[in-house]
Amino acid sequence: MFVSPAINLVFWSFALAWVLSLEKKKCECSDDWRREYMKYFFGAAIAIQLLILSQNTKIIKMVALPMGLATLVYIGASISYITDQRKKRCECSKSQARLILFSVSIFQAAVVAWAVLRLVRKSR
């Protein structure tokens, strides 16, 4: 599945803005290592999208595997983090951005699961 780097750039910027807003309003119930991870992941994702737009294939190839692994960690971290925020009834993190980020993370997890199942079936 291919999504335009420009669309990805907008999405990751939107996600980073949400995390930074939690820090700015000193949302204590959202303070967690996963929030920090997502902040740095979103920054890296934005940088990668800029590289893709610049068509710097040499660097893109160098960072593809580490970023792929970081993305898997991000998907799990974001789903568990947002689920915990909802369970804790963390009102200062509650927003449309949180809902959108959670929905996209669930979709990403489903795509990864589907791809793994395809690989397993193909290897038989």
Image (cartoon, rainbow, N blue to C red):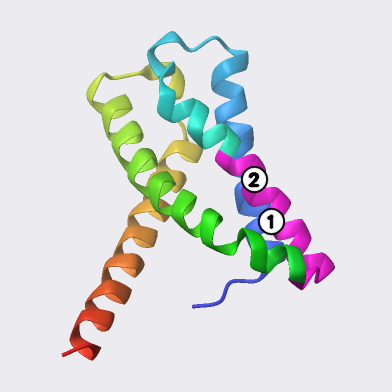
Nearer to the camera, 122 or 17: 122
Q: Is residue 100 above or below residue 83?
A: below
- The disc placed on residue 48 is 1
**Residue pointed to by mark 2:** 44
Q: Main secondary structure of the magenta part?
A: helix
Task: Tell me: 82 left or right of 18.
Answer: left
Quadrant in which the C terminus is drawn: bottom left
> CA–CA distance between discs 2 and 1?
6 Å
Nearer to the camera, 2 or 98: 2
- At horizontal 34% and vertical 32% (from top left) the residue drawn is 81
Q: Amino acid at mark 2?
A: Ala
Q: Which residues are magenta?
A: 41-57
Q: Is residue 111 above or below residue 87?
A: below
Q: Amino acid at mark 1?
A: Ile
- At horizontal 45% and vertical 47% (from top left) the residue drawn is 100
> Within 10 Å of the Cα at label 1, are there few (<14), some (14-19), or many (20+) other Cα atoms?
many
